[in-house]
Amino acid sequence: MLEELNVFAIIVEQSSMNKASTALNLSQPALSRKISKLEQDLGVELFKRVGKRLELTRIGRLTYDYAIETRQQHLRFLKMLAEYKTAGRSSLTIGASLTTLQTTLPD
């Protein structure tokens, strides 16, 4: 559903299926299928189709806000993941005398 939410947000931001299909490098029918799937999964109508124009419904506006929050949260996670991967993993060497090693450390 994350992909469909992202597609939905881009359609809203581009205010056109044509522009969104160009931006996403997807065909218009593919975009329509993704939006239909999202509407079916959510059980609501996100757009009112007025001729060739799309208008957001009230729940569509709320879904857009959620899609933006989800996108930002996802980007924060990816940034945190990248920082984790780039942070040097250091090794730790423990030294002890033979008698300490035999009596206090496990095999």
Image (cartoon, rainbow, N blue to C red):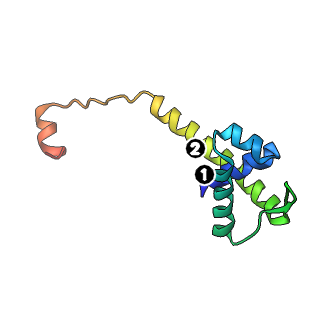
Label 1 sits on residue: 3
| Numbered disc 1: secondary structure | helix
Q: Tell me whether circle 2 and circle 1 mark residues in contact (CB < 8 Å).
A: no
Camera-near label (2 vs 1) is 1
Indicate the position of residue 105 as horizontal and vertical percent values. Answer: 19, 43
Question: Label 2 sits on what residue type?
Answer: Phe
Indicate the position of residue 52 as horizontal and vertical percent values. Answer: 85, 54
Say which residue appears at 76% left-offset and 67% top-offset: 45
Indicate the position of residue 106 as horizontal and vertical percent values. Answer: 17, 47
Residue 46's quadrant in the figure?
bottom right
- On screen, residue 89 versus residue 25, left or right, reads left
Q: Considering the image in quadrants, where does the N terminus appear? A: bottom right
Q: Earlier in the sequence, mark 2 or mark 1?
A: 1
Mark 1 Cα shell of 10 Å, populated few (<14), some (14-19), many (≥20): few
Furthest residue in direction bottom, as rendered: 43
Say which residue appears at 64% left-offset and 54% top-offset: 4
Is 39 rendered above or below residue 85? below
- On screen, residue 32 versus residue 16, left or right, reads left
Is 19 rendered above or below residue 89? below
Say which residue appears at 51% left-offset and 34% top-offset: 82
User: Residue 77 got which mark?
Assistant: 2
Front residue of 88/29: it is: 29
Is 21 rendered above or below residue 93? below
Indicate the position of residue 67 as horizontal and vertical percent values. Answer: 71, 53
Front residue of 70/49: it is: 49
- On screen, residue 28 versus residue 48, left or right, reads left
User: Residue 58 got which mark?
Assistant: none
Residue 78's quadrant in the figure?
top right
Mark 2 Cα shell of 10 Å, populated few (<14), some (14-19), many (≥20): few
Q: Considering the image in quadrants, where does the C terminus appear? A: top left
Q: CA distance from mark 2 to mark 1?
A: 16 Å
Residue 72's quadrant in the figure?
top right
